[in-house]
Image: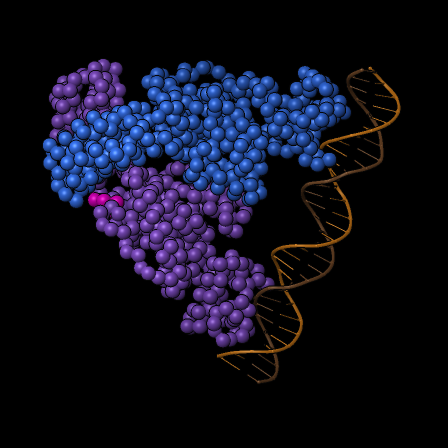
Chain colours: A purple, B blue, C brown, D orange
DNA sequence: TTTTAGCACTCATACTTCCTGAGTGCTAAC
DNA sequence: GTTAGCACTCAGGAAGTATGAGTGCTAAAA
């Protein structure tokens, strides 16, 4: 059977109605709202065809139709119009970027929150490392005789610090020595390259009696691990309950706990080639996401690192709006890190094109 | 009317049963389970008395009784037995402390997560500052000609850093100068004492054309603000749905959004004098918490700072267990920061005393 | 004076049954 | 190819009916 133009228009109308109302859509509604000048009976015939082709589903015989995942897929790929962000929206996003990104070291976390606030859906955020991370430089700052601060900076330009207290005293020259040793021996190494042997050699070279080297290096290792074993941050899970599909406690709970267990980041989808991707219901590999859609976008953090932000919601999701907002935000984040300006605000309308 | 010993025993039995079952408790259940050797009729009479005194409530005429907030209060104050942590429990807590507290600078956040995992209730964590925070020292580390790292340390021994890139180049001596100036002018000042005037004077003294000073100082201000305008972290909100009292979406949603809006920390209760406090239902000031109980504990972070961890749940909460776990954890955290050892593990049983 | 057995009464919950109306598929006419 | 008309389906709400846990009260027993 052929997917005529009219069928597409009807499909689109159904999906957009359904996204709004969350209720099965009947032929009459479409006959009236689609702009097509046909009777409900005609629409009925077309709907029957669309169902036969797998784009629609019927919850029960005497109900209207709802889009199937295949239907959403078609919609997302071809039918969906560009949602143009309104002036308010772009302003709000830019504002959020400027306000929230003050603590640059917490970008990933913050990005997740912004997304959730912006979309009113639960969001997740994680970083995905393209290359291996290494330490670019060490600095040791003496605080008192028995305490100093370790500052490490990675080649991805993440800076982390820790305050260390010692049971014994320490002199400034000692610290200097240690510092030099660290910077000559342990910079530019990936996690695997920092071997126990290397540690032993370095420790020996330093005449290191207090295990200071291992103290600093193990902090460095922690940092590298944190950045590589990526961490997930979720935000706004409470938004789930706003959607009627999660009225049933069961679903809500299973999805929520899936999202909130701060565990394996690998369960979260990541866009592959393109900067943005949409996963509809069963397209998700994870079982708990089978009737959930996920929209993910990635942004540039800096050399070799990408951030990933994603939105989770029912398959009946306002894809047009969400993708528009998410991609604008992701672009903004990329620019922010590339030291560039935020994208210019286009003077325009609100709502669909 | 007098609150006889038998009445107390009955009340306690009712509360403990209700905590378990979440369903109104009838006289028969108590007659059998309380250990008191009386008939259900007797219990019935006593229950009627307890209700008259305000310790119990009846959802409807033909149902059993449930504890009133006043009942819980009495229970918590006098009736509740000590819950003794089992070996597994203490081990688990110690383990969590050691595992999770690696990133010391994120303690507060991590503490919240641990609590939630440990109690299976939603948890929140925040820091409460006793005194005003000031910056103790500044360090500027040159990275490249056009970038440097700011490291600031507060008098509460929190260290924060930020990488700054400049549009212009910078020399090492310049940075040195700046550093000295910062350390002489801006250390030991509270937020309010860092006035625009002071900034102007300093800027002038430094012949600072690029606003470097204000750049660094505004970072310092951010840090101070973060520490003073305390921030709330919540964790494990999804646990709410596990409790039957939040079956009704309405309640669940309102409480969840109350908890998840990452806003005003002042809405979260903080223990006043004692290190631990329990707020039952209407004892909470916040409206959204009126039929919710909160257990909060505080722990020592370091000079002048305290951390606060709290658990939120239905008034029907296992107070004995929660308080035991929370207080053990809080002690552990305090010890951890006092450089001390974790509390020793007592060899003992599991469950109630 | 306290405890207990007995009994009538209450009322939330669960289970029926019935009804309504939105929506369908099909047929026959346009 | 499109439309009007009609019989049919079925989820969801309304109304009615049981069920049974639990109560309060009374009167007898301890």
Depth check: give the residue in front, A91 or B104.
A91
Q: Which x, y percent locates residue D19?
A: 75, 41
Residue B341, by quadrant, is top left
**Relative side of A39 to B68, left or right:** left
Q: Residue at x 49, y 39 (%)?
A: B258
- Residue at x 35%, y 61% (from the top left corner): A348
Q: Main secondary structure of the magenta part?
A: strand
The relative height of residue A202 versus residue A122 in the rendered view (above or below) is: above
Whether residue B254 is situated above or below residue A66 in the rendered picture: above
Depth check: give the residue in front, B138 or B277: B138
User: Is residue B340 toward the left or the right of residue D2 in the image?
Assistant: left
* Residue nearer the viewer, B331 or B87: B331
Q: Is residue B188 left or right of residue A246?
A: left
Spot occupied by residue A311 in the image (x, y as percentages of width and height): 39, 49
Position of the C terminus of chain B, as image quadrant, is top right
Range of residues picked out in magenta: A300-304
Residue B160: percent from the left, percent from the top? 27, 31
> Residue sitting at 60 percent across and 26 percent down?
B72
Residue at the spot 24% in from the left edge and 51% down from the top edge: A341
């Amino acid at each position: 059977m052929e997917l005529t133009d009219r069928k597409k228009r009807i499909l689109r109308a159904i999906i957009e109605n359904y996204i709004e109302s969350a209720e099965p859509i009947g032929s009459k509604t479409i006959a009236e709202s689609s702009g097509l000048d046909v009777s409900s009976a005609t629409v009925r015939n077309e709907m029957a065809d669309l169902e036969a082709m797998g784009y629609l589903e019927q919850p029960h015989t005497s109900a209207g139709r709802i889009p199937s995942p295949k239907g959403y897929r078609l919609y997302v790929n071809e039918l969906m119009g560009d949602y143009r962000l309104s002036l308010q929206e772009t302003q709000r996003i830019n504002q959020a970027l400027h306000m929230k990104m003050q603590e640059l070291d917490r970008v990933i976390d913050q990005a997740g929150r912004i997304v959730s606030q912006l979309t009113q859906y639960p969001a997740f955020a994680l970083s995905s490392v393209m290359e291996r991370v290494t330490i670019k430089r060490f600095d040791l700052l003496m605080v008192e005789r028995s305490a100093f601060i370790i500052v490490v900076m990675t080649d991805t330009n993440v800076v982390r610090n820790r305050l260390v207290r010692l049971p014994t005293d320490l002199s400034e020259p000692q610290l200097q020595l240690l510092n030099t040793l660290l910077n000559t021996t342990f910079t530019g190494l990936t996690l695997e390259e920092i071997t126990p042997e290397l540690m032993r050699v370095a420790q020996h070279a330093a005449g290191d009696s207090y295990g200071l080297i291992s103290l600093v290096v193990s902090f460095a290792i922690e940092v590298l691990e944190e950045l590589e074993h990526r961490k997930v941050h979720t935000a706004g899970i409470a938004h789930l309950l706003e959607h009627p599909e999660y009225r049933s406690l069961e679903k809500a709970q299973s999805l929520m706990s899936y999202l909130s267990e701060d565990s394996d980041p690998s369960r979260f989808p990541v866009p592959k080639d393109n900067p943005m991707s949409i996963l509809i219901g069963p397209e998700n590999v994870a079982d708990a996401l089978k009737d959930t859609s996920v929209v993910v976008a990635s942004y540039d953090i800096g050399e070799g690192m990408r951030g990933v932000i994603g939105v989770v919601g029912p398959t009946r999701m306002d894809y047009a709006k969400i993708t528009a907002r998410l991609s604008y935000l992701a672009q903004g984040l990329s620019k922010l890190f590339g030291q560039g300006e935020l994208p210019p605000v286009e003077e325009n309308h609100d709502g669909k094109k």
